Amino acid sequence: MNDEKPVLIVGGGIAGLCAAIALCRQGFEVELVEIRPTWNIPGVGIIQQSNVVREMARLGVLDAYLRAGFAFDDVALYDERGVQTVRMPGRRLAGPDYPANIGISRQALHRVLYEAATGLGARIRLGATVAECDERDDGVNVHFTDGIRANYALVIGADGIYSKIRGLLFQDRYQPVYTGQAVWRYNFPRRAEIDHLAVFSGPRGNAGLVPISEDLMYLFLTSCEGPGPHIDKSRLTVQMRDHLGEFGGVVGELADQITDNSKVVCRPLETVFVDENWFRGRLVLIGDAAHATTPHLGQGAGMAIEDAIVLSEELAGDGSLNTRLERFMARRFERCRFISEGSVLAGEREMAGDRSFDRAALTTRMQLVTAQPI
Ligand SMILES: Cc1cc2nc3c(=O)[nH]c(=O)nc-3n(C[C@H](O)[C@H](O)[C@H](O)COP(=O)(O)OP(=O)(O)OC[C@H]3O[C@@H](n4cnc5c(N)ncnc54)[C@H](O)[C@@H]3O)c2cc1C
């Protein structure tokens, strides 16, 4: 690798911004291009578990991150009537003074990461992407859609599930696959008793309540939508309430308050997993571009953040670029595969209505795996 040249990151989501922070901290010069012309962050909130809290400490953003979200320790499972069946205390991997988990709005998380990346000197350009890449022995010549041309040591594709950089590496070999489920979300004022992640098992999908600030929590729901999702934008509240019809307890009470179509966020679930090295030459993929999975284990962004940190560590090490990227793969591949496959399995069991599926055991295993150092 030519360490004198800048590194280009394509995509300003969680993976791209964390890579920018981690690479700046390792002393690399970093440029990032984001295709959206403005920071209009999609989605509602996100659960970040103990491995992520630990890595946020290593990125040096933990205090700002904790201020921006809602810290909690426990995860509890409930049946559809709202009766608690299991309560799993979280492990405080960042140290005894820090919480095990955090819920945070996507907008707040983005703000923390963006401010850290730009504060460390990453140059970020909006409304542009890569038009062409021409790899040479000493770098990659990149031609951008806004007419700019420049030369880089490495191009990192952090451009999400529909990654253009993945297309440059593998053409159309890896395409997102719809799983048969959708996820619905709606914000509510936080109830005092929702001071933990609460997951409710229903007969046709799971619901959950996630605190994301002192004042806010969101309700999520997975639904089985069959071969093609039938999401009618004019009837989002009706559809979401209908899916919640079998839940009692707090979820049942909240269902009646879902009244504003514009506040329902619904997305069909898709996955992709690049089942070989995520790099060739001077192009490498991280985050959803390499391994987008379903949210059933709440670890997609966690894996993206870990990818960013491990990649920065390995790029700062010795050896040829190929050797550094092979070390990156060796640290990431099986861990991400476990999360991808476990998440998909949990969704398949939900769709099959398999009440014997031991979700708590899978969650415990995920916690043990992700507690291991990266
Ligand atoms: C409903 C749902 C709920 C989830 N909940 C959780 C959760 O609770 N916890 C968790 O850990 N994970 C969760 N995930 C997974 C998590 O959202 C993703 O794993 C994470 O956002 C991946 O980050 P990323 O940066 O790799 O990709 P993205 O978030 O998709 O970011 C990619 C970025 O690249 C930009 N981009 C795209 N194409 C280009 C291009 N050609 N050029 C330049 N820029 C481009 C995009 O605009 C975007 O800014 C959830 C996912 C879903 C669908």
Image (tube, rainbow, N blue to C red):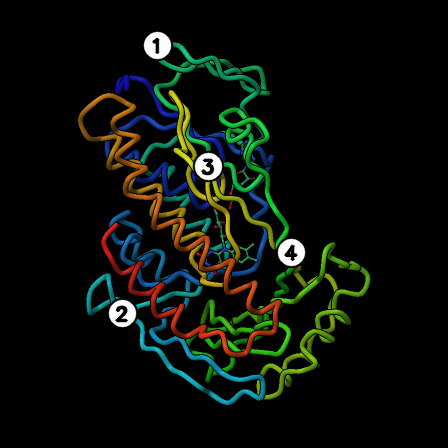
**Circle nearer the N terminus (4, 2):** 2
Read off the residue under disc 3. 158
Spatial separation of the CA atoms under disc 3 and disc 4? 20 Å
Amino acid, disc 1: Asp
N-terminal of the two: label 3 or label 4?
3
Taking the spot 57% from the left edge, 73% from the top edge, the residue there is 206
Q: Which residue is mark 4?
A: 267
Query: What type is the residue that disc 2 sits on?
Result: Arg
- Please state if 346 lies on the left or on the right of 319 as rendered: right
**Disc 2 designates what residue?**
91
Which circle's residue, 2 or 3, is located before the other in the chain?
2
Badge 1 is on which residue? 137
10 vs 134, nearest the viewer: 134
* Badge 4 element: strand
Q: Tag 1's secondary structure? A: loop
Q: Could you tell which of marks 2 and 1 lies nearer the N-terminus?
A: 2
Residue at (36%, 72%) from the top-left corner?
72
Left/right of residue 169 with respect to residue 186 in the rendered view: left
- Callout 2: SS: loop
Q: Quadrant of residue 140?
A: top left
Q: Look at the numbered disc 2 and say if its residue's Cβ is closer than 8 Å to ligand 1.
A: no
How many C-alpha atoms fall within 10 Å of the one at disc 3: few (<14), some, or many (≥20)? many
In front: label 1 or label 3: 1
**Of the residues shown, which amino acid type is indicated by label 4?**
Arg
Indicate if the residue with disc 1 has its beta carbon within 8 Å of ligand 1: no
In contact (CB < 8 Å): disc 4 and disc 2 = no
Assess disc 2: are there few (<14), some (14-19) or many (≥20) residues with their C-alpha within 10 Å of its C-alpha: many
Label 2, label 3: how far apart the Cα atoms are: 29 Å
Q: CA distance from mark 4 to mark 2?
A: 31 Å
